[in-house]
Image (cartoon, rainbow, N blue to C red):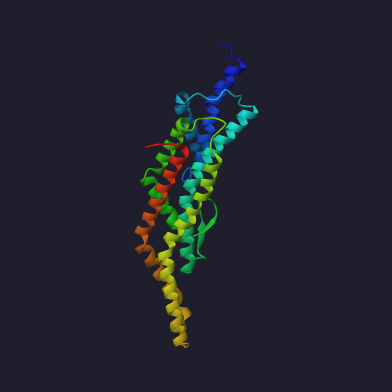
């Protein structure tokens, strides 16, 4: 059999451009991008998904993979995949931000550990919330829905030189504010209660200066913080579920995927 350059270019484009979008999503989305997931497993998933969906994709643009147009198309696929992973990462970042605020308010800011997902130091409260968020993400089948969205995006947003518009990028940046809003919703009940406790200790210390309030204030603050974390766990689950639902709704709107 003799293959000419045009045929090789068509076959390469049929698998390379979809693989770029899928790999960008897997490398930026939560759970898939974790350092605990072996690189070989991510590579296998990327190749498997590409091989399964490539034969059924819409007509690809007639452009050379190594040309200027092919480079623009590849950048668009990277941008679409990273956008999907970035929005989902913002949901997990909201829990990390809320956990950090809670840890600092209850005096556990010094107790840090390495986050295996990002490889940075985070307070243990934030790590606790992050582990819960990962378990909830798996329970809600978020990993399967992420793969389904990236597969459906090839139908609603085919491989082409035009992908995300300028308005879509602005909406993506604006959606990043949900990280801080969600983190405050998680931390606000505990931070408010801790503020009242500290104000009460300040009044007691002012009324009775002979009492060594610092020797008993720190254990009381930590104990009350743990109790409040336990009491407010249902609120954390609710906020995370709402943020995750908003993230997937935003992704469907950006990728023009309907359900």
Q: Which residue is rendered at x = 47% and y = 46% of the image? A: 88
Would you place residue 187 above or below residue 66 in this image? below
Q: Position of residue 214 (x, y in %)?
A: 48, 79
Which image quadrant: the N terminus?
A: top right
Q: Is 170 displayed left or right of 153 in the figure?
A: right
Q: Position of residue 93 (x, y in %)?
A: 49, 53
Q: Position of residue 107 (x, y in %)?
A: 48, 69
Q: Which residue is rendered at x = 41% and y = 66% of the image? A: 190
Residue 185 appears in the figure: yes
User: Which residue in the rendered view is the most extreme toward the top?
Assistant: 1
Q: In front: 242, or 144?
A: 242
Residue 35 appears in the figure: no
Q: Which residue is rendered at x = 49% and y = 34% of the image? A: 46
Q: Position of residue 24 (x, y in %)?
A: 53, 38
- Mark count: 0
Q: Is 150 displayed left or right of 232 in the figure?
A: right
Would you place residue 67 above or below residue 42 in this image? above
Would you place residue 3 above or below residue 125 in this image? above
Which image quadrant: the C terminus?
A: top left
Q: Which residue is rendered at x = 53% and y = 27% of the image? A: 15
Would you place residue 22 above or below residue 12 in this image? below
């Amino acid at each position: 059999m003799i293959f000419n350059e045009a045929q090789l270019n068509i076959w390469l484009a049929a698998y390379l451009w979809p693989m770029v979008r899928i790999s960008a999503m897997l490398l930026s989305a939560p759970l898939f991008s974790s350092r605990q997931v072996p690189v070989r497993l991510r590579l296998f998933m990327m190749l498997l998904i590409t091989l399964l969906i490539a034969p059924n994709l819409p007509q690809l643009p007639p452009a050379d993979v190594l040309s200027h147009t092919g480079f623009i198309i590849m950048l668009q696929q990277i941008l679409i995949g990273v956008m999907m992973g970035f929005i989902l990462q913002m949901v997990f970042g909201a829990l990390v931000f809320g956990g950090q605020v809670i840890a600092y308010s209850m005096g556990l800011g010094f107790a840090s550990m390495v986050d295996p997902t990002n490889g940075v130091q985070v307070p243990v409260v934030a790590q606790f919330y992050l582990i819960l968020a990962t378990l909830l993400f798996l329970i809600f089948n978020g990993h399967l829905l992420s793969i389904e969205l990236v597969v459906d995006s090839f139908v609603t947003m085919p491989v082409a030189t035009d992908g995300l518009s300028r308005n879509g990028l602005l909406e993506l940046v604006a959606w990043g504010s949900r990280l801080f809003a969600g983190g405050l919703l998680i931390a606000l009940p505990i931070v408010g209660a801790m503020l009242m406790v500290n104000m009460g200790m300040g009044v007691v210390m002012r009324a009775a200066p002979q009492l060594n309030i610092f020797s008993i204030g720190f254990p009381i603050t930590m104990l009350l913080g743990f109790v409040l974390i336990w009491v407010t766990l249902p609120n954390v689950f609710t906020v995370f579920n709402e943020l995750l639902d908003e993230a997937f709704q935003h992704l469907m709107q950006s990728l023009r995927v309907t359900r």
